[in-house]
Amino acid sequence: MSDPQPAHFPQRIFSGIQPSGGLTLGNYLGAIKRFVAAQEAGVETIYCLVDLHAITVWQDPAKLRHATRELAAGYLAAGIDPARSILFNQSQVPAHAELAWIFNCVARMGWLRRMTQFKDKAGKNAEEASVGLFAYPNLMAADILVYHATHVPVGEDQKQHLELARDIAIKFNHDYGVDFFPVVEPVIEGAATRGMSLRDGTKKMSKSDPSDQSRINLTDDADAIAAKIRKARTDPEPLPESVAGLDGRAEARNLVNIYAALADIAPDDVIAQYGGQGFGAFKPALAELAVEKLSPLNAEMRRLMQDPAEIDRLLGTGAVRAREIAQPILERTLEIMGMIRSV
Ligand code: TYM
């Protein structure tokens, strides 16, 4: 956590995950596991299920409801404690969408046109994409800034969006002559900030990949996890004797990084242990580790999903606490901008 903020912005962590399909090992290692570590470090932590972001592409209502509860179960099973972290779904805190509108008026078209994720998601059919998909990063900036959050742990793929959030904070502060929004710090740390597909080491592991073999889902059972690792694409060479030897070997690097992140060790330590050995030895070791770490999580998610009413209750309590922080910051923003606040 570099670059301390000015004193009037105490350290506060915010991050979010879309409930748009199941959670992957990429989400777990790149995000949730690190969210838990931040909570354990005693920092103030606010974690969101960004359902308003999910609807920037079509969501079947029943599936969205299920995915939101399953994501909440994933957060909880991984160790997010709703007594110590604020855990809630975005649509229950209207201040996010209100501040996003304001940021629609701060951010420039050109800034959003540069967003590579929009280009990737909209593909050749940008004219058919929802306006929400285009304005998505403004809502993301609002998520963070409506809490005056200072640090945002994310995977590598969110870096450009966080740079936009910084630009929005700087422009707002400059336009209104205030020092009101913190310039957020992305926190992109650890061995698996960019977990790659098990079928193609040049593509990100993603819940939207059409091939289920490309990813490990947090709902996969032990057999499925082991089978996917066994079938993961690799090259015929043994693991190198140093991390530098992973250059140009995307699939090998990915499996080493996954091992390191699961075991909470550095990739160097993995190489020190397995360098010179072939995948015939390394893959079973990785499968065993993955099953050992993920099976309890999987079992706990299934247990929690048996009581959806309790999950909804927890999200509601989290939303009340979130609103208490967000609403005054939104009110002050509107005041700064010259809006009359008479109620
Ligand atoms: P989303 O839902 O796509 O992913 C949630 C988090 O998981 C990380 N992640 C990965 N990390 C490593 N390897 C991977 N293969 C991998 N796939 C996903 C993402 O980087 C992210 O940290 N726009 C965000 C959600 C969001 C948000 C926010 C995040 C909305 N508002 C405010 C932070 C702050 C997204 O779509 O993440």
Image: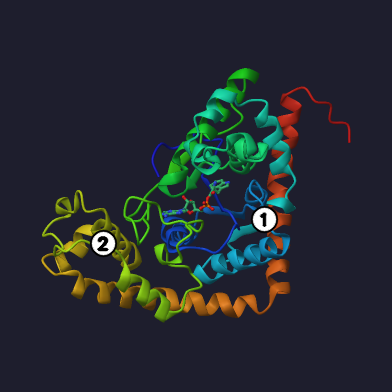
Q: Amino acid at mark 2?
A: Val
Task: Judge from the rendering whether residue 331 lies leftward or rightward of residue 151; answer left or right.
Answer: right
Q: Looking at the image, is 63 positioned above or below residue 174?
A: below
The image shows residue 103 at horizontal and vertical percentages of 65, 31
State whether residue 175 is above or below residue 64.
Answer: above
Q: Is residue 311 left or right of residue 188?
A: right
> Seen in the image, is 271 located left or right of residue 257?
left
* Residue 36 in sight here: yes
Residue positioned 44% across, 45% down in the render: 157
Q: Position of residue 225 (x, y in %)?
A: 39, 74
Q: Earlier in the sequence, mark 1 or mark 2?
A: 1
Q: Which residue is mark 1?
A: 59
Residue 131 percent coordinates (x, y): 67, 36
Q: What residue appears at the point 72 percent right and 65 percent down from the top-left corner? A: 62
- Amino acid type, label 1: Gln
- Name the residue located 44 percent from the left edge and 40 percent from the top edge: 159
The answer for how far apart the CA atoms under marks 1 and 2 are is 35 Å
Indicate the position of residue 136 as horizontal and vertical percent values: 61, 40
Q: Quadrant of the C terminus?
A: top right
Q: Nearer the viewer, residue 343 or 299?
A: 299
Camera-near label (1 vs 2) is 1
* Circle 2 SS class: helix
The residue pinned by badge 2 equals 256
Q: Quadrant of the N terminus?
A: top left
Q: Residue furthest right?
A: 343
Determine crowd level at label 1: few under 14, some 14-19, many 20+ residues with C-alpha closer than 10 A: some
Task: Residue at 73% x, 73% y: name it.
Answer: 309
